[in-house]
Image (cartoon, rainbow, N blue to C red):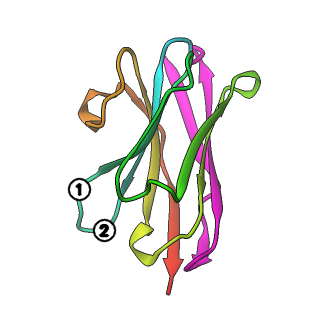
Amino acid sequence: QVQLVESGGRLVQAGDSLRLSCVASGRTFGSYVTGWFRQAPGKEREFVAGIRWNSGTTEYADSVKGRFSISRDNAKNTVYLQMSGLKPEDTAVYYCAVRYGAMRDNGAQYDNWGHGTQVTVSS
């Protein structure tokens, strides 16, 4: 079992940058995929970015390509989501999650979730 804790969310202005962290404890990432998802009020949860722990292979949602970057620190068991050029539509609760196997953008296929961190972007 993997426990995940997100942090770094806060209120920022449009155009600002922010880095979210997802720290894992318990079973290490190993061959996991770690994904970042977000859910805005009244909207469905959506995939933001994912990274394959061993290879570092990444994927991004079209809405964040060129603005967000996912990375990992093996020694710290931490995955980061660096966000730049933030827009009001990026406002959401951001969650990290892990799964075995291939990269997926469907949250239902992820096994473990954190409790989320709120990102609010004001215009």
* Element on which disc 2 rests: loop
Q: Quadrant of residue 10?
A: bottom right
User: In the image, 38: left or right of 79?
Assistant: left
Does 118 lie within the magenta span? no
Does 6 lie within the magenta span? yes
Q: In the current view of this chain or complex, which residue is farthest to the right?
A: 75
How many numbered badges does the structure rendering display?
2
Check the image and report above or below for 15 versus 51.
below
The 10 Å Cα crowd at callout 2, few under 14, some 14 to 19, many 20 or more, is: few
Question: What kind of residue is marked 2?
Answer: Pro
Q: Which residue bears the numbered disc 1? A: 44
Check the image and report above or below for 72 versus 102.
below
The 10 Å Cα crowd at callout 1, few under 14, some 14 to 19, many 20 or more, is: few
Q: x, y (%) of residue 52?
A: 49, 24
User: In the image, 1: left or right of 63?
Assistant: right
Q: Which residue bears the numbered disc 2? A: 41
Q: x, y (%) of residue 78?
A: 66, 32
Q: What's the CA distance linking mark 2 and mark 1?
A: 8 Å
Q: Which mark is residue 5?
A: none
* 61, 6: nearer the viewer: 61
For the point 36% across and 14% down, which residue is it? Answer: 101
Give the magenta part as a residue range. 1-29
Q: x, y (%) of residue 90?
A: 43, 67
For the point 44% across and 34% down, which residue is it? Answer: 97
Question: What kind of residue is marked 1?
Answer: Glu
* Element on which disc 1 rests: loop
User: In the image, 47: left or right of 86?
Assistant: left
For the point 34% across and 64% down, which residue is it? Answer: 40
